[in-house]
Amino acid sequence: MSTLAEQFRQDGFLLIRNFLDKSVVENIYREAREIFAVQIKHVTGRTVDIDDRDAFENAMFEFFQKDFTAFRNTGVTVQHSLSLHQFAVSEKIVNLLKEVGIEQPVVGARPAMQFNSRFLSKDGSKHWKLDAHQDWRTGQGSLDSTVIWFPMVDAGADLGALQVIPRSHTWGLLESSTSGYQGGITAQLNDEDFVQTEFQVGDLLIFSAFLVHQSGNNITNNIRWSVQLRYNNLAEATFIERGYPMAYIYKPEAELVTPNFPTVEQLEAVFASPTPAV
Ligand SMILES: O=C(O)CCC(=O)C(=O)O
Ligand SMILES: [Fe+2]
């Protein structure tokens, strides 16, 4: 057995240095900011330089304050970006999954991105970071279900990079206050068992969906931009036996999001010209 797979099975995670092409990460990060910039302009009236980190992130905070619904929807839209999805099924990632023993990977959930900052939380709530949890509880996929996590900016303890408990993937599914993302493990955990991970752009963390982990504490004024990818193994026996359960529920809104929209005139305008103005 390869040593990489051995170490992964033993520790429940691997932090692989300089694994990702920086330009690929930068591209996903850039597309995310470009998408946000459109709504920042729309909501705040500001044209922001996406390469001026502090100015851009201050505009993010202002956008969050001014229109929480648009902010949340834009955050979800960012998770649908083409660069992120392309990356999530890229050869590099698929090969890594196979290398750690996921023989037949399948996407477990939509690729996700997080924008962690206390300035992106309502009423001083803790909702911008996640308490100790195991991703398996939300995904409920194959027993070797695997998560990939990496920041798109250099991230250490101050920016609140992920904290993990090595080898906790063998502890079983721990009691938790909810199967959703808010709340967390209610079983007794020792703070000192958590290891603070630290990343340069290009480093990647891959871990078992049973590994206990939590968000670090971002004490900076910047946003911790990170990506989470989840996979199951189609070849894993209990996953087959359980009929490939899919616990992530993905469904349309029951009501029209924008009442009385669109008008016939708006549609006519869209379809009128053979070369629509962009
Ligand atoms: O990025 C984080 O701080 C936590 C992410 C995480 O654990 C998750 O999305 O399941
Ligand atoms: Fe998680």
Image: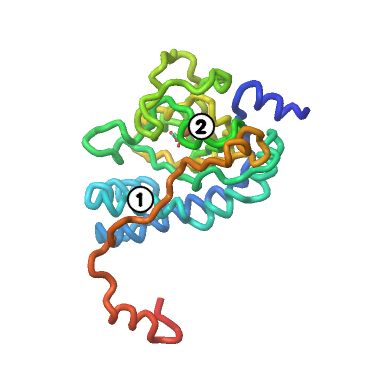
Name the residue beneath numbered marker 1: 56
Closer to the camera: disc 1 or disc 2? 2
Mark 1 and mark 2 lie on one chain; the one further toward the N terminus is 1
Q: Where 173 sits versus 88, above or below?
A: above
Q: Position of residue 17 (x, y in %)?
A: 62, 34
Instruction: Find out if the beta carbon at label 1 lies less than 8 Å from the nearest ligand 1 atom.
Output: no
Q: Position of residue 83 (x, y in %)?
A: 53, 55
Quarter of the view holding residue 14: top right
Q: Quadrant of the N terminus?
A: top right
The kind of residue tagged 2 is Trp
- Would residue 247 be found to the left or right of residue 100 on screen? left
At a point 76% along the width and 29% down the height, the residue shown is: 2
Q: Position of residue 4 (x, y in %)?
A: 71, 29
- Would residue 134 be found to the left or right of residue 180 on screen? right
- Dot 2: element: helix
- Would residue 73 be found to the left or right of residue 68 on screen? right
Q: Where 113 sits versus 51, above or below?
A: above
The residue lying toward the viewer, choosing from 71 and 60, is 71
At a point 46% along the width and 21% down the height, the residue shown is: 174
Is any part of residue 111 visible from this angle? yes
The kind of residue tagged 1 is Phe
- Would residue 22 be found to the left or right of residue 277 on screen? right
Q: CA distance from mark 1 to mark 2?
A: 34 Å
Name the residue beneath numbered marker 2: 136
- Dot 1: element: helix
